[in-house]
Amino acid sequence: MSQPIITVENLAKRYVIGHQNTRRDGLRHALENALRAPQHWLKASRKSRPATTEEFWALQDVSFEIKPGEVVGIIGRNGAGKSTLLKILSRITEPTSGRITIDGRVASLLEVGTGFHAELTGRENIFLNGAILGMSKVEITRKFDEIVAFSEVEKFLDTPVKRYSSGMYVRLAFAVAAHLEPEILIVDEVLAVGDQAFQKKCLQKMEGMHLHGRTVVFVSHQIAAVTRLCQSALWLDTGRVREFGRADLVCSHYLANGQGVASCRDWDQARFVPGNEWVRPERVEVLAAGKPADSIDIKSPVSIALDYRVLQAGKILIPNIHIYAQDGTLIFIAHDWYSGWRTRPKAAGKYRTRFHLPGNFFSEGRITVRVAVSTYNPFEVHVDEPDAVAFNVVEAESGDTSRGDFAGHLPGIVRPLIESQTELIG
């Protein structure tokens, strides 16, 4: 059995946060004090106010191992400690306690333009960044054309990178890091800066690195990418390891338990209500047999009910829902095409749209619903609420009698009962 290429033992990182003590010293109070007692105010202002400090543990007791050639995704909410962990693995910052062992050459892409000099051209930065990563000039020259082709910045290769857009910056930085053949590539969610086509190309590149036996560690909020690319996933929650293991299982647990999305969303008392001057949502909920439900039996139909208020007439407003599987994959989009409202504007008032989804359609797992209200000529989005509601599809303890004597889990996002027939023909 191969030795781990990365070993992390009881890792912890502490930051000390300073808080300046404040009084009621707005501009009005400062002017009043200065006018009443100028000398006293001047002396007081020269005295430094006492500050308080607070310890913040970004990571606590983090331990795991990564094998050579493994692709590991790190997931978790914002502020969970993901970027701090990558900075420690990249030797950018030191841990407060604990130990890490890395056996191999590391290339990191944690921020846009890491290791780039703003005054140098793209061409010069390729050689500079390659040297920082420990590559020889011969090695960089051999890979130069591939790097330029991947980054798609050939036209601006002799332009100082300070004139690059953030997307151009990250394309060139990723191209250098990925093509100079490190044993370990560490990538933060900086890839979100790029467009969809570039993100897809980066994911394909990381997939190719895995096939060539290289190790990749990356942070991503794209759960579908983590489940597709990774053998393992590390779920961080407030600086601690919540779960580490098989990527599909960890991502499933994260989506089911970590997102906090309920089966009902009510904006009546919300501080922020999505929408605009045309329409605002009021409530969306998951219904089974006409009643609110968090879990739906796999055989049962389910409805998504959206209540919304049209604030002024004049728009052909069409509600729609986007249905996602537990790995973040979009299953389908449904629009309210058939209720007669798709060709005429809605008058001001409160409306309810129900989308009816059949039983024996979804596989077991967590289903997340995005709700939106749009117009299509011209196309405009008036309401768009990702992760509006969610529900679990479960198989009843009594078994799935709709499939006769078949028993067992069926893989896949959907599992419809497809009509079929068999006849003896010979």
Image (cartoon, helix red, strand yellow):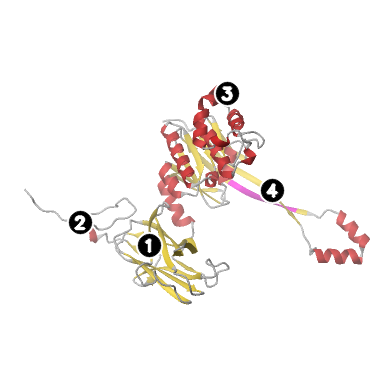
Give yes or no for contact between labels 4 and 3 (Cβ–Cβ under 8 Å). no
Category of crowding for the residue at label 3, using alpha-carbon neighbours closer than 10 angstroms: few (below 14), some (14–19), many (at least 20): few
Which residue does the image show at 58% across and 40% down from the upper left? 169
Q: Earlier in the sequence, mark 4 or mark 1?
A: 4
Disc nearer the start of the sequence (4/3)? 4
Q: Please say whether residue 45 is visible from this viewpoint.
A: yes
Q: Is residue 61 left or right of residue 3?
A: right
Three-letter residue code for mark 1:
Ala
Q: Which residue is mark 4?
A: 16
Mark closest to the chain's N terminus, 2 or 3: 3
Query: Mark 1 Cα within 10 Å, few/some/many (few <14, many 20+)?
Result: some
**Magenta stretch secondary structure, dominant:** strand
Residue of label 1: 334
Q: Secondary structure at mark 2?
A: loop
Can see residue 183? no
Which amino acid type is marked by label 4?
Answer: Val
Residue 2 drawn at (x, y percent): 43, 30
- Magenta stretch in the rendered image: 52-59
- The answer for how far apart the CA atoms under marks 4 and 2 are is 62 Å
Q: Is residue 138 left or right of residue 47?
A: left
Mark 2, residue position: 405
The residue that appears at 41% across and 64% down in the rendered structure is 320
